[in-house]
Image: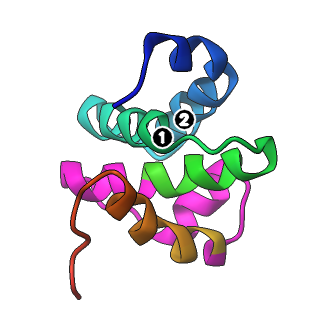
Amino acid sequence: MYRARDQVENEEWLATIDDAAERLDLGGEAKSRATDLFLSTVPVADRSKRATVAASLYAGALIAGNRRSQSAVADAVGVSRLTVQNRWKDLLEAAGLEPPKW
């Protein structure tokens, strides 16, 4: 769970989620899930936030049924595909969700 204060403190990163979701042509549900995941697991270090944005978008799209490739999400956010690959499952687990077992 997150606080309203988290939203205010992370406006820049929430705008990054919005911009990347637009580039990926993701629907409102995927963007909302990504925002919730990000705010529920927001890291303290600014250098980790871009990676968390990417992992949140990838996982949010999966949850909403608007699956996008890790490469597409990474390109939209400006991180490597490996960053998305290494973080999305841990992000889901930290949010109390179980990642798929494919």
The residue that appears at 36% across and 34% down in the rendered structure is 36
Q: Please, is residue 51 above or below residue 32 in the view?
A: below
Circle number at residue 17? 2
Residue 44's place in the image compared with 98, above or below, is above
Q: Which residue is mark 1?
A: 38
Circle 2 packing at 10 Å, graded few (<14), some (14-19), many (20+), is many
Badge 2 or badge 1: first in the primary sequence? 2
Q: Is residue 79 magenta?
A: yes
Q: Which residues are magenta?
A: 58-82
Residue 94, compared with residue 5, is above or below; it is: below
Count of marks overlaid on the render: 2
Q: Residue at x 47, y 47 (%)?
A: 24
Residue 94 pos. (x, y %)? 38, 57
- Is the C-beta separation of discs 2 and 1 under 8 Å? yes
Residue type at numbered disc 2:
Ile
Q: Residue at x 54, y 58 (%)?
A: 73
Q: Amino acid at mark 1?
A: Phe
Based on the displayed image, in which of its 4 quarters is residue 67 positioned?
bottom left
